[in-house]
Every structure is written in structure tokens, then in C-alpha cells.
Amino acid sequence: MLCKSLIILAGASATLASTPKGFEPGTTSALIVSFGDVAAEDGNVLEKAATQTAPTIGTQSKVEGTSFAVLMIDLDIPTDSPPQTSTLLHWLQTGLTQSTAATPINTSEGSTDAFIFENSQGQAAFAEYIGPSPPARIPLSHRYTQILVDTSSATEANLDVLKNAAANRRGFDALSILTQAGLADKVLAGNFFNVTNPGPVASSTSKKNSTTGNGSGSAGSTGTGSVISPTQTPFVPGAAMTHKIIPFKLHKQPTRGDPDGSKDARSLDPLEDFM
Ligand SMILES: *[C@@H]1O[C@H](CO)[C@@H](O)[C@H](O)[C@H]1NC(C)=O
Ligand SMILES: *[C@@H]1O[C@H](CO)[C@@H](O)[C@H](O)[C@H]1NC(C)=O
Ligand SMILES: *[C@@H]1O[C@H](CO)[C@@H](O)[C@H](O)[C@H]1NC(C)=O
Ligand SMILES: *[C@@H]1O[C@H](CO)[C@@H](O)[C@H](O)[C@H]1NC(C)=O
């Protein structure tokens, strides 16, 4: 039994999934990630359509620990100052447990026995899975990075750090947040894959129409909660404030209930412009 699985593992270990170069807290231990029969590993390029529901994750050997969390972070969020990029949290699920027996994960690249991580107690995600959807902006290729974190010894306070951090998906700083949660050295395995927008890059002035929300401040819109509701105080560049006295600004009708015009298109862009 053991021998058999070792042989299977030997075949699979030709690939060395890990977190992308430069990502912290990084790891070279492979997290197996598959979307149905599509294997996501080693930064391979996946079709966006294949990645829209949360993947199956596992490891080739059973890891120590009794509870785990998975995070998925996009490291290549466009900003208004390319090539500068930001990050976005796509998924944060705690309360995972690992299966006691290995099960075959069958993908088009073959079958690998893995010990699967499951949300066996049905815990609510701190951040529900959002599928990749890189926009036609620079960079067109995004690295979606998954890390598995051992939360067995995490306290409620530690987990609260994650929960609070997950409320703001944009600019998610994994190293800082995991450090605050006392979990930066608990990353057990990692992986990433690449989803690329076919382009061409849309010109920055022809961004989507800004009035999709039918009026500003509609924080009461239902359902997706922190995903798209503009609950964050928008960042107002100092320059924008000084425009108040410039004639140009007078011709630009401020949005109702938004006297300083700070809730402009940029600050209200829904996340899908960035994922
Ligand atoms: C994977 O394939 C094996 C046979 O190769 C099969 O026994 C197993 O049920 C399959 N697993 C899944 C999840 O479909
Ligand atoms: C992602 O894949 C594209 C090809 O679709 C490639 O050009 C790009 O360099 C890859 N990005 C990374 C970060 O590997
Ligand atoms: C955005 O607005 C322009 C005109 O202002 C219109 O031609 C275009 O179809 C709109 N796009 C969307 C996605 O609504
Ligand atoms: C936004 O308003 C337009 C008419 O002004 C309406 O047709 C559309 O259904 C509204 N959309 C939403 C999401 O309320």
C-alpha cells in the first residue's frame, strides 16, 4: 500500500509546485490544486472558464495538524500606475480538515493520490471564492497563488485577524496579515497558476461606464457583501480636493449625495475590474 503510493508520487513529483518567486510567506512544498479534471500547478496557464468554482486542494502526504486554512491571492492586480501592481484576496477559507485516506485526483495530466482538505464542518468562508477574471489591463497575465496554512494552534484572536483582514480583499498583504495572526511560519504548501486576458489592453480612458451602480452610496445592495459594496472610504488624492475651485470641476456635476465628487468611477470600480 505504502509502496504503491510512493511509486505514484514519484511519477507526480516531476512537477514542483510552489509559490511564485518573490512571494512571501513562500514555500516549495507542493499544494495540489485541481479544478475538476484541470490541474493547476507550477504557474501553468489555465482557461478562465475552468477556474470559476473553488478547486480541490490536497497534499501528496498527510501533513501534521488538525485544522487548516487556504488563501488564494492574485499578485498582479493592475493599478493606475503600471507596471505597478497590487494584490487581491480571492479566497480565504478556514476550518479545513485533511482526509485520513488518500484519494485519486484525476486530471488530464494523470492521476495523483492526494490527501484532500475539506471544509468538513461547513465553516463560513472569511472570503468566499471568487474566480479569476483578469481585465484587459496591464498586466494581462495574473498569478493566482494558493497557500495552505496550519491553523491548529491559532487562537480565536489569531483567526479574527484573518477574518478582519479578509473584509478588505484589495491590497491584501499576506505576509503582513499572517505575521499579525502569528501564522507567517505556518505555511505548509503552496502553488500558483496563471490566467491571462487575451487582450488587447483597453485604453485607460475607456474604462467601463461609472454609473453601473445606479446612484452612489448604495451600500445596501444585497448579497455579495464586501465583494462589491463600496464600504471603504475611497482614497481621495490631494489633487482632487484642490480641484474644487477649478472651473472644470464646476461643469462636472457631482454625484448626488457626494458633494466632493470623491466617489468617482475609480473609487467605485467593482472588483471585477481587477481580478
Ligand atoms: C480516478 O480514477 C480512478 C481510476 O483511475 C478511479 O478509481 C477514481 O474513482 C477516480 N476518481 C475520481 C474522483 O473520479
Ligand atoms: C502567464 O502566461 C502567459 C501566456 O499566456 C505568459 O506570457 C506569462 O509570462 C505568464 N505569466 C507568468 C507570471 O508566468
Ligand atoms: C458606456 O457608455 C457609452 C456611451 O456613453 C456607450 O456607448 C457604451 O455602450 C456603454 N457601455 C456599457 C458597457 O454600458
Ligand atoms: C439602472 O437604471 C436604469 C434606468 O435608469 C434601469 O433600466 C436599470 O435597470 C437600473 N439598474 C439597476 C441595477 O438598478
Image: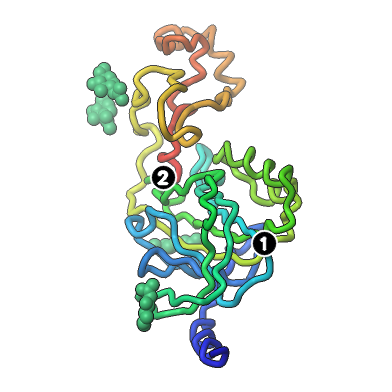
Residue at the image position 41 percent from the left and 40 percent from the top: 272
Residue at the image position 49 percent from the left and 82 percent from the top: 12
Residue at the image position 42 percent from the left and 70 percent from the top: 39
Q: For numbered disc 2, what is the local secondary structure?
A: loop
C-alpha separation, residue under disc 1 versus residue under disc 2: 31 Å
Q: How is the image coloured?
A: rainbow
Residue 253 placement: quadrant: top left
Q: Of the residues shown, which amino acid type is indicated by label 2?
A: Arg
Q: Which residue is mark 1?
A: 187
Q: Which residue is mark 2?
A: 137
Q: In front: 53, or 109?
A: 53
Can you give x and y, in whole percent of width and height, for residue 216 in the image? 43, 18
Can you give x and y, in whole percent of width and height, for residue 4 in the image? 51, 91
Can you give x and y, in whole percent of width and height, for residue 129 in the image? 46, 49
> Quick check: which quadrant has ligand 3?
top left
Q: In front: 243, or 223?
A: 223
Q: Of the residues shown, which amino acid type is indicated by label 1?
A: Val
Q: Is residue 85 visible?
A: no
Horizontal side of residue 45 vs 14, given as left or right: left
Indicate which label's residue lies in the foreground, 1 or 2. Answer: 1
Q: For numbered disc 1, what is the local secondary structure?
A: strand
| Badge 1 or badge 2: first in the primary sequence | 2
Residue 63 placement: quadrant: bottom right
What crowding class fits label 2: few (fewer than 14 Cα within 10 Å), some (14-19), or many (20 or more)?
many
Residue 20 placement: quadrant: bottom right
Query: Assess mark 1: CB under 8 A from ligand 2?
Result: no
Residue at the image position 61 percent from the left and 20 percent from the top: 238
